[in-house]
């Protein structure tokens, strides 16, 4: 059972950006935490009136403003920055300088330089800046982290990750797909989460081979091969084009883990010497070291969003360290920028010779 | 030449955009219905437009400045008809010179009568709502051409296969899982056409003045049976046909909810809907949904091996005994399928591995 800290007053929350991520995730998480008196939404901000009105209706006591500059900032507020990525740096730095704590939605910024400026601002002001890499709050990913840290299944041998599928997110404009507004495609979007988990579990890779299918625009498919100094390798395939298995398969010297990204609280384990595989819920331990079936409910993405907000509220009150501070958000952005620097064209062998020549021409033009 | 492609994120539309853009044949203007549909198109820096293809004003704005338009949008039965009704007036108002509309060989039903040709009128009453809608759409466009000045070519492709084909990916998955099935050992005719051959035909339809006002059936050059089709996919997927189930088509009965949905979609029922109280509609829906479709499962048995899911539409398709002729397309358009079936399937196999549908 989640423990709700005894807070003297709920932490005031300002929501900047009332698009799909706020509508489908943050609004419900905040409503729950308001009920528990952990937070109280003080203001919602979005220049797009219909989006803003939809969120404001759920928090009628909150001030509703179109311009970020008009938000009534109070120090020690929690600002959820869920605006388009190109606004993340400006709004986060502004809020930090007002004495607020910030939870910035991923990707942390439109460029590594912007993200570094945000981290500098957090250091300078001493205010907490967290990045919305919510998958780190999944029970399944935390177990994998422990297994990696303690060598429970031995040393890593290899991994294979497939993630993505036909794009279904209800984008409210085409800015998400324009290079001038959003610097990358599937690697920059889905890949932020994927790479963040790999960095968290396995550390920095020592070499990479990155390929994608962009030809003047954003990649819809990409592959990434990673090598690590201890000698193991991994392969990542991301797509917003066609269904993938949405699975992480991690091989260690004494067993393997398979994790489906849609199952925040479930894992499949294959252990050396065991002829079957084990699939089940990840549950907290009880005093006797085992949890009886049905004793504790599983958790999913909604709970991860709630835990993320609780962690930041605690950090603002000085009761807890940030689980995902800015420095962690920078790691996946650095790796993504390295991938784009090393970009090579993916083979698309079903194209005709004339198309392949045209593709190469477009890719050369983009690189130049 | 500036060509708008309506339905540019679909299977055929996307391949058309790729070909036109990468081969440098024309300026392409992709038209999609929703922003999310730009995800794969956004690999290219193109002047896309977002518009509801069933809305004349929105579509007119999207087609401004285009010389020709290819209509390749997908939709349900109702959308197919409303999109066809909007297409011609929008193209006319935008000053487009020629429309190439993708109809379907299914306008002749999935089991066409022997002797069916391009000049056989579409069947306006079919069991399948989709096929009926395609037939109606074709008729709406043909009538509009008689009263309008925008040139019109309608294409009736058969079973389109190639990279990003849902059918091919599904069959590859069924072959992998041991759930693939064939009627009559796959002896039925599969009126297959490679998507790249279809793109060539679309290009010819755009460029051939004599094609105006005509409809064309389109196939690959070979006569392909369903067994050939499955065998080629199996080859591309690195498997074979050993585990394919032999199926005798069962008698298909719709569920009460499906029957209710079909009834509700008729023009007569639609006209009555506004006067039926909402409470009655809710009760009828709930009753249909609650109707037990099958008996509850019996626990006293071992798990079954994977079983094929036999669909009525696929049973009918596989029962086809008529190969659509392409003589008219050859004569008027100069359509001579460049890609052999085998070469096309090799390309498809490369894509199946790229997309991870089958392991490399």
Image: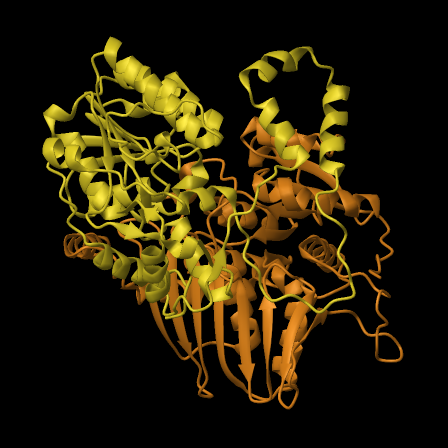
Q: Position of residue B162 (x, y in %)?
A: 31, 52
Residue B145, given in percent of the width and then of the height, sits at 25, 15
Residue at (27% x, 64% y) in the render = A347
Residue B249 at x, y percent in the picture = 51, 48
Front residue of A364 and A220: A220
Of all residues, the one furthest to the top in this rendering is B147
Residue A179 in view of the camera:
no
Please identify the quadrant where the N terminus of chain A is shown. Answer: bottom right
Q: Is residue A92 visible?
A: yes
Chain shown orange: that is A
Q: Residue at x 50, y 50 (%)?
A: A89
Task: Tell me: residue A139, above or below residue B220.
Answer: below
Chain (yellow): B
> Dividing the picture into quarters, in which one does residue B68 lie?
top left
- Residue B188: image x %, image y %? 36, 49
Q: Residue at x 82, y 74 (%)?
A: A285
Quarter of the image holding residue B55? top left
Q: Viewed as shown, does residue B221 lie left or right of A203?
A: left
The answer to whether residue A157 is above or below residue B24 is below
B252 in relation to A109, above or below? above
User: Quick one: quadrant of the C terminus of chain A?
Assistant: bottom left
Vertical placement of residue A351 versus B323, above or below:
below
Q: In which image quadrant can residue B75 be found?
A: top left
Instruction: Identify the residue at image location x=28%, y=51%.
Output: B224
């Amino acid at each position: 059972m989640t423990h709700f800290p005894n807070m003297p007053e709920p932490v005031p929350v300002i929501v900047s950006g009332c698009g799909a991520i706020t509508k489908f995730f943050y609004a419900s998480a905040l409503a729950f935490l308001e009920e528990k008196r952990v937070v109280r939404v003080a203001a919602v901000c979005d220049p797009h009136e219909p989006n803003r009105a939809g969120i404001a209706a759920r928090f009628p006591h909150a001030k509703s403003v179109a311009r970020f500059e008009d938000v009534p900032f109070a120090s020690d507020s929690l600002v959820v920055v869920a605006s388009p990525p190109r606004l993340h740096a400006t709004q986060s730095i502004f809020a930090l300088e007002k004495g607020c704590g910030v939870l910035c939605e991923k990707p942390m910024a439109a460029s590594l330089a912007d993200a570094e400026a945000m981290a500098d601002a957090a250091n300078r002001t001493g205010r907490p800046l967290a990045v919305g890499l919510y998958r780190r709050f999944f029970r399944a990913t935390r177990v994998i982290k422990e297994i990696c840290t303690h060598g429970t299944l031995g040393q890593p041998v290899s991994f294979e990750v497939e993630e993505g599928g036909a794009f279904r997110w209800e984008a409210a404009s085409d800015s998400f797909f324009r290079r001038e507004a959003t610097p990358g495609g599937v690697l920059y979007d889905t890949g932020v989460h994927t790479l963040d988990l790999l960095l968290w579990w396995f550390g920095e890779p020592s070499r990479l081979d990155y390929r994608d299918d962009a030809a003047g625009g954003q990649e819809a498919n990409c592959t990434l091969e990673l090598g690590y100094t201890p000698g193991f390798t991994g392969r990542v395939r991301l797509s917003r084009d066609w269904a993938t298995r949405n699975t992480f398969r991690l091989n260690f010297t004494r067993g393997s883990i398979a994790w489906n990204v849609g199952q925040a609280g479930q894992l499949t384990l294959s252990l050396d010497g065991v002829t079957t595989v084990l699939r089940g819920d990840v549950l907290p331990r009880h005093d006797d070291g085992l949890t009886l079936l049905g004793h504790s409910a599983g958790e999913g993405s909604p709970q991860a969003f709630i835990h993320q907000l609780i962690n930041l509220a605690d950090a603002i009150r000085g009761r807890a360290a940030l689980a995902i501070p800015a420095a962690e958000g920078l790691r996946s952005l650095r790796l993504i920028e390295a991938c784009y620097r090393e970009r090579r064209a993916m083979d698309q062998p079903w194209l005709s010779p004339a198309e392949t020549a045209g593709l190469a021409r477009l890719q050369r033009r983009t690189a130049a | 030449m500036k060509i708008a492609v309506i339905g540019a994120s679909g299977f055929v539309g996307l391949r058309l955009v790729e070909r036109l853009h990468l081969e440098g044949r024309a300026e392409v203007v992709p038209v999609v219905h929703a922003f999310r549909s730009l995800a794969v198109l956004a690999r290219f820096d193109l002047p896309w437009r977002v518009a509801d293809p069933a809305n004349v004003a929105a579509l007119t704005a999207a087609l401004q400045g285009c010389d020709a338009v290819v209509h390749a949008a997908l939709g349900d039965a109702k959308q197919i008809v409303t999109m066809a009704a909007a297409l011609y007036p929008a193209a006319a108002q935008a000053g487009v010179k020629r429309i190439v509309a993708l109809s379907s060989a299914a306008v002749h039903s999935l089991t066409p009568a022997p002797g069916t040709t391009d000049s056989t009128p579409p069947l306006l009453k079919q069991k399948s709502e989709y096929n009926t809608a395609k037939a109606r759409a074709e008729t709406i466009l043909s009538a509009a051409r008689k009263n309008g000045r925008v040139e019109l070519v309608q294409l009736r492709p058969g079973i389109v296969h190639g990279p990003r084909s849902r059918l091919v990916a599904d069959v590859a998955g069924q072959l992998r899982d041991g759930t693939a099935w064939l009627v009559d050992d796959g002896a039925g005719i599969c009126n297959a056409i490679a998507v790249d051959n279809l793109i060539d035909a679309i290009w010819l339809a755009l460029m051939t003045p004599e094609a105006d006002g005509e409809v064309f059936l389109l196939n690959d050059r070979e006569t392909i049976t369903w067994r050939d089709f499955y065998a080629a996919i199996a080859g591309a997927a690195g498997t074979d046909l050993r585990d394919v189930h032999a199926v005798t088509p069962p008698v298909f009965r719709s569920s009460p909810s499906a029957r209710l949905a079909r009834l509700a979609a008729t023009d007569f029922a639609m006209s009555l809907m506004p006067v039926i109280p909402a409470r009655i509609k809710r009760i009828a829906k709930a009753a249909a949904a609650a109707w037990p479709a099958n008996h509850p499962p019996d626990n006293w048995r071992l798990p079954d091996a994977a079983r094929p899911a036999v669909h009525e539409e696929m049973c009918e398709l596989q029962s086809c005994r008529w190969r659509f002729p392409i003589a008219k397309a050859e004569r008027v358009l100069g359509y001579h399928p460049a890609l052999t079936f085998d070469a096309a399937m090799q390309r498809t196999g490369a894509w199946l591995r790229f997309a991870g549908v089958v392991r490399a």
